[in-house]
Image (cartoon, grey):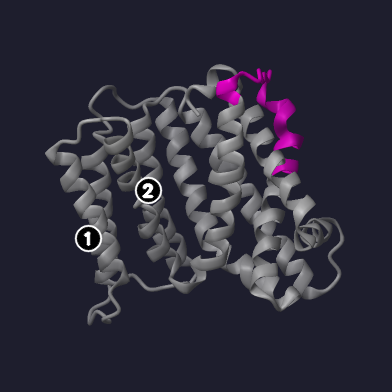
Amino acid sequence: MQRALVDSSPTAFVVVRFSLVSVVFLVISRSARLGAKLLFVAKTREEKAFRNNVLVLGVAIGAGYIFQTIGLLTTTTSKSAFLTSTAVIWTTFISLITGREKLTLKLCIAVLCTLVGIFLMTHPFATQGITIGDVFTLCCAAVFGVYIVWVDKALHSAIEITHDEHSATMMVTSTQLVAASIILLVFMPAMGPQKLILTPYCIGALAFTALIATGATAYLQARYQNVVTPATAAVIYMLEPVVAMLIAEFFLTEQIGFAEVLGAGLIILGVIIAQVRTRMRYEI
């Protein structure tokens, strides 16, 4: 994405990314077309609840990617990775105030292990001080926290309409992206001049981020996140940098030091702690 932003403005890139995957979903799925229709014509209580929840998702995912992409213009990849990972804190906080879960000692330990692990892996403040990009990336983490919590709410309201989990997942996945695309298109004129030059770098980044990093992952998240709490899901999502480190080691011949290995171990430990089924005796 950083290389693609040489050829594209952040807003234009995200709009095309979301629009591309939205069109794919609308073409291949009847449930996706039903969800898009309900954005404009919702009659029953269940349909209105679905529309409201999916609009929250659309705003959250659209704003999140815009904030992250703008942040990458003035911050480093490592700082972006660390600051985005603070979504695990925002998710926990939002889950608490919405009554989704209680703050347990187990959850606190899992979150702390995960954040320390991310810090050790990314060395976020090794090269420069605080930048405006860091602020945008923190905003990205906050709205991603909202997104993680609201995925479950949107899926539940979709199931009440379709009575089928797969169809409901397709509705949630596609409709949030359609909503995000429309919202971003409406506000695009206020975001300044835009550019999009379809170089091989830009086309490759658009194809991968649209179909895989947005479409496939949004479907899997909507389908399976509801088997755990939002905060636990946020901890699990922090395995992403561990996987990236392993890919870099085996395919990009990057050298991994002791701090990175220790950080990866702490992240894995945090995920294990979050998944332990034994109920903790004390709650905070």
The three-letter amino acid code for the residue at tag 2 is Glu
Residue 170: % across, % down: 68, 61
Q: Residue at x 25, y 57 (%)?
A: 268
Q: Secondary structure at mark 1?
A: helix
In the rendered image, the quadrant that contains the C terminus is bottom left
Name the residue at the left extreme: 258
Closer-to-camera residue (257/138): 257
Would you say residue 54 sits in the magenta stretch? no
Residue at x 48% of width, y 41% of height: 139
Please provide percent x and percent y for residue 20.
70, 39
Residue 270 occupies which quadrant of the picture?
bottom left
SS for tag 2? helix
As displayed, is residue 258 above or below residue 101? above
Residue indicated by mark 1 = 269
Task: Say if 143 sits above or below 6 in the image.
Answer: below
Q: Which residues are magenta?
A: 181-202
